[in-house]
Every structure is written in structure tokens, then in C-alpha cells.
Image (tube, rainbow, N blue to C red):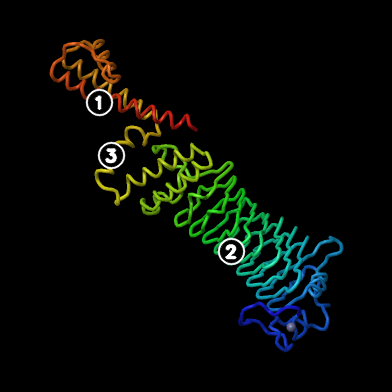
Amino acid sequence: MPAEDPRPDFDPHWPVCTEEGCRGAQSEWERRCLVHAEDLAGLRPGGDLDLRGAAVDSAKLVEIVYRFRDHENRAFMFGELRCDHAWFSGRASFTGGEVRGVARFSDVHFGHLASFDGMAFASVLSFRGARFPGRAYLGPLAAGDVDLAETWFANRVSLDIEAEHVELVDAQFDGGLLLETTGEVDANGTYFGAASTIHGAKVASLSGSDVSNLVLTDADLSNCYFLGAHRLEQLRIDGRTTFARPRSRWRARRRMLADEGKEPPARVGATYRALRKSLEDSKNEAGAGDFYYGEMECRRHSKESSLAERMILWCYWLLSGYGQRALRALAWLVVVVSVVTGLLTVWGQDFGMAARIAVGAVVFRDDRTELTAAGEWTVLVARFLGPVLLALAVLAIRARVKR
Ligand SMILES: [Zn+2]
């Protein structure tokens, strides 16, 4: 072996090779592991490969893997791959083949190269806790689920993975990550040490991750859990990204966070504020407007907001959807004009004149018609409400046009 065994101590829970100091699993036909076995005749295409705990160099691995080559299909065929706690001291190349069972590389230490290009895994592919100090080529590959939790990649890595679920929980990408997948990605507590991109994924969580180096493109964030993510305001969201939508059709249509309604409003509000900043920076004004709406909703519902603040926000929401909904403000304007017209009619004006005074009042035009005292008060209130509503409507239209 060229280098010193980098693996921390571990308890082999398998019958151990009789070779002095070896912790590899015994083969089925000898009391030695595949590295120390006298012959490899027991290995054949489609069979299981057990390298648990073994220390395997490049040459030995090639010799072992070659036994699984199906010459008719010109591909490597494996049943189950059990390689937990193995140490591949040189190149570890599993390319262009098929694995019909589970493939486990948990806590494996790879050498200067790990390659899994063009592999198809019918079931789970687990690298949980594996360490990649060299270059890693993971994909394009297909698998049921890919578990990269607690892995460590020293260098930048590109993952092109077709899978239902890709687990990145507590994984560490020192040189950055480029991940392409349409599957679900859980990036809870993931470390992105350099510029990283996740493309096309349904992101389930970014909680506990520092996302300042991360770009999400064409992502589905409708079920993404953001709470507890660090430096969210530096997250970049590009391309066609989808967010959650309110379920009830009586609520305003907008992009929202899946956290809203499930977590304390004050914390969700802070998350909205950080993400709004990120959307503004990437010139996504529509998204930013919706997240402003979300932030205000959270403040309106938060018990940490004072009563006065909540009352003001309640009015702001009711009258104009926090300055984001022009139609709502205009509808209120129509209501004010109608009510003032109605009241003036009740207090003796004829309908045409009443309507003219009402419209005039909301746009500040002084109509010198003699009114009763009640009429004067009504017009006074209308003169206050009218311009406020008009201003809110203009603001909302401006917010929309900016998009
Ligand atoms: Zn051995």
C-alpha cells in the first residue's frame, strides 16, 4: 500500500479476513477478503461484490471488477455492491455498468479518482459519510435514491443524477458543487465552500445551510423549507422558479414560502425579508413584490408586533394589499363614492348632484354646493379617504409596472 490507511477506527461487523491487519470481509469461498483471496473464480457477472472494510489499490480493483464484465452486453453487471468502510487507495472506477441491487459505499475513503460515469443503479446508491479527497466523476448516472449525506468532496464536483431523491444533508463541498437533477434534493446543513449551482431540482430544504455561494436555477421551491438557512439574502434564484401558492382561492394569488403558516410568523417574516433582498438583487421584481406581501402578512399575524402596528397593517392590507394590489384600492374608491352618493341622496340631494359631489370630493375638487351639516361631514371624510386610496392604487400600479 502506498499511503497510510486514512480510515478512522471502525468495528467490522462481518467475518474478517485472516490476513494480518486486514479488516476486509471474507469472501464466500475463502476465509480471506477479495484482495487477499487466492483466486477470484467465484466472481461472475451479475453476482454480488463485497469489499467491505478492504483496502484496495487500483490494479487489484481493476482485476476484481473485470470479473463482472458481461461480454455479451459489453457492460459490467453487478447484483449488490457492498463496499462500506473500504479504502480505494488509487483509482476507483465503476463506469458503464448496471447494479441490480443496493449499492453501498458508506464511509468509503476514495483515492485520487472516483468515477461512476454511466452507471445505472436500480435501487439505492449510498455514499453516506464517504470521503473524496481527489477528483470525483459522479454521473451522468441513474439511481432510485442517491445518499450523499455527510460526504466530503475536497474538489469541485459535477453531479448529473437521475434519481427520485438526492440527499445532501450535512455534505461538504469545499470546491463547490454543480448538481443537475430533476429529483428532490435535501440540502439541510449542506456546506457550499465555493460557487455552487443546483439546477432543475425540487429543493426540499436549505435549512441550516449557508447559501451565500449558491445559485438555484429552474428550481421547484414549492415545498422548500428555508427557515434557519444562513445568508439567504445572498442566495441567487434564476430561471423559471416555482414557489408555493396559497391553497384557499379567497386569498390573494402570490408566490409564497412553504414555511408560512407552519412556523412562527416573526421568523418566517425575517426569511421573506432576506429572500426579497435576494430577488431584488436578481431583478425579479414580481417575486420581490410577492415576498414583500408575505413579509407584511407575517408581521400582521405576528404576536411580536404591537397592537397599533397590527391595526395599521390590517388597514394597509384591507385597503390595498400592502400597496401591491391596485384593484383592491380602486374597488374601495368605488365603494367610497357609492356610499357618499347614497348618504347625500338620503340627506336631500338629488342623485345626479350627489354623485358629482362624491366624485369631486375624492379627487379634491371643491364643489360649492350648499350641503347639510351631515353632508359636509360626509364630504370631508371622502376628501380624506379618496386621495389616500388613489395614492395606494397608483403605488400598486407602479409596483406592478416595475415588473
Ligand atoms: Zn484481506
Look at mark 3 in the image and give the residue it sits on: 312
87 lies above or below 246: below
Look at mark 1 in the image and give the residue it sits on: 384
Look at mark 2 in the image and give the residue it sits on: 172
Q: Earlier in the sequence, mark 3 or mark 2?
A: 2
Please tell me in which quadrant of the rendered image residue 60 appears. bottom right
Q: Residues within 10 Å of mark 2 (few under 14, many from 20)?
A: many
Q: In which quarter of the image is ligand 1?
A: bottom right
Q: Name the amino acid type tagged 1.
A: Phe
Q: Which residue is drawn at 74% across and 81% down?
A: 33
Q: Residue 211 carries which label?
A: none
Residue 307 horizontal side relative to residue 92, left or right: left
Residue 10's x, y, as percent?
61, 81
Q: Name the amino acid type tagged 2.
A: Gln
Please tell me in which quadrant of the rendered image residue 178 appears. bottom right
Is the CB of the residue bearing disc 3 within 8 angstroms of ligand 1? no
Alpha carbon separation for disc pair 3 and 2:
45 Å
Residue 221's x, y, as percent?
52, 48
Q: Residues within 10 Å of mark 1 (few under 14, many from 20)?
A: some
Q: Residues within 10 Å of mark 3 (few under 14, many from 20)?
A: few
Q: Secondary structure beneath disc 2?
A: strand
